[in-house]
Image: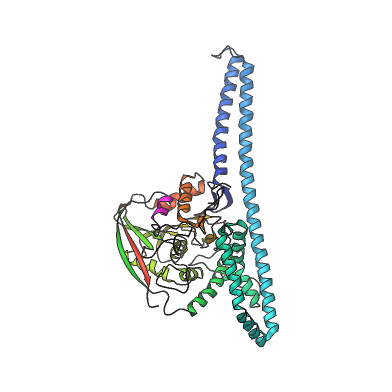
Amino acid sequence: MTSRELVISGGGSLVIATDELDAIIDRCGPIARRLDAVADELATVAALADRGAAPLTATPSTALASSARTCQRSADRLHGLRTGLVRARDEYSQLEWRLRARMAGWSADVAFGAGNAVGFGLAMLGPAGVLGLAAALFAAGPELQLIGAAAGKRLREHPELLADPAFLAFVRLAVDAADDALRGVARLPPGLGDSEATGFGPFQPQTPIARQDLEGRQWLAALALAAVTLTARGDLTRVRLSASPAGSASAPRTLAALARRIPGQESGAAGMSAGPGDGGAEDEPQVRIERYLDESDSPRFVVYLGGTADFGLPAGDEPFDMTSNIAGVADRNSAALETARAAMREAGIDSGAPVLFVGYSQGGLLAERLADGGDYTVAGAVTFGSPGTGIIDPRIPAVAIAHTDDLVPALGGMRSHDAAESHVIVERAALAGMPFPEGQTMPAHDMAAYRRTAELADASSEDRLVAARGEVLGFLEGSRFGQATEFRGVRIEL
């Protein structure tokens, strides 16, 4: 796969197709039909020549007939090639789907077995044995810290490991299998609770992979959030909001235009090496809201949500931090979510005004949460590099753009490619065919790389992506008098 090649899935179909393959399939049809027409024309001229009525009497009818047969054979071969390519694409997609399902089931079985063994061992030890084991682990703390430091040093020296396909596949499987491991430790029956998995809002994920994906992430993140909350001082979700007018705005017409307007890009996150976060710097806005009027002077909005600005723990003043990341994955309230909601209230967004959510990284997770919460009239959602599952109301048009060599989307687990008809997933290997950039930790997560992928997605003629672009951006047709406001939230009462 090249760095320019898009892989497109979703749209109510199990088909997983590359943009280049679909372009070849699209070209085969018109060329074959043109050859059919040329063959028919040559055959007609040959028949006229046999009767002496052809204008080109110097051309033997046998040569014309031979040319007609050659054109027809070429047309037939092109028709056959197109049919074969479509069949191969569809069969590959079905095979990949079955392999993904089996891999998810296998990882769940292994995780449950390992967890069950741990749970059985703890039960055999009894309370005194468990306390002794805890004391031993506490005593081994310095050695464990050394191991962690060595692993961290290894990753700093070789950040390309974070983009390795095998490592990212392991991360996705591990995230999905987290709930099964915890069930095993608790000695619960395997799969308990799968039928009760819920999305962020009223939409219920329907497929086993989607349910496992969502539940595994939430179990693991809930434990991490509990640990973070125990060490926190005060309420971690309260914020103070400030607003700054950002001038007039014209309605975005492309996915790339949406990507360019996400806040927090001025300082530049060159592969997450330029600053503490992946989407911005201190004092930069985290939310941008554009207000437009339609033909009847009714307002409509676009809400842009930036990425994580602080990866440190414990929580500080920055609401778009790791604590909010963990809370978002656990489907809990967070300071980042409260910042977005407060900004929307300040901008005058009520439940009746249509709104398009656009988010990058943690902002993508927030966009999914807000779009699926049932509190707003959602016109669509577009995410870039989001760790979210992509599980939102199937009635909402959505485009999720992710890089296959980006660790952050991998933290969302195995993405369900059998998305709803209105949901399309666009993927690309951002680093394919190029050396790993020096001095960068996660260059595939760089917003500049996602802007480039958005440009490729805009240029794509793949049917599902064309339809999704039209749905997501179509509600802004005829918009006028655009005004933009940027917001910054600060966590308070820590």
Q: Main secondary structure of the magenta part?
A: loop
Quarter assignment of residue 84 = top right
Residue 271 pos. (x, y %): 48, 57
Residue in the picture at 61% in, 66% down: 174
Q: Which residues are magenta?
A: 252-279
Q: Is residue 259 magenta?
A: yes
Side of 122 relative to 486 (left or right): right
Locate residue 292, reporting x and y percent.
Answer: 32, 55
Q: Where is residue 317? Give x, y as percent.
A: 39, 72
Q: Is residue 388 left or right of residue 183?
A: left
Q: Which sits in the foreground, 128 or 209?
A: 128
Query: Hey, which quadrant is residue 184 in on the image?
Result: bottom right
In the rendered image, is residue 466 in sight?
no
Give the residue drawn at x 59%, y 67%. Answer: 151
Who's the residue at 48% across and 47% down the image? 456
Quarter of the picture holding the C terminus: bottom left
Q: Looking at this view, is 466 or 285 the one in front?
A: 285
Residue 317 seen from this side: yes
For the residue pair 78 and 278, the one nearer the viewer reads as 278
Q: Position of residue 196 (x, y in %)?
A: 57, 71
Q: Residue at x 34, y 67 (%)?
A: 345
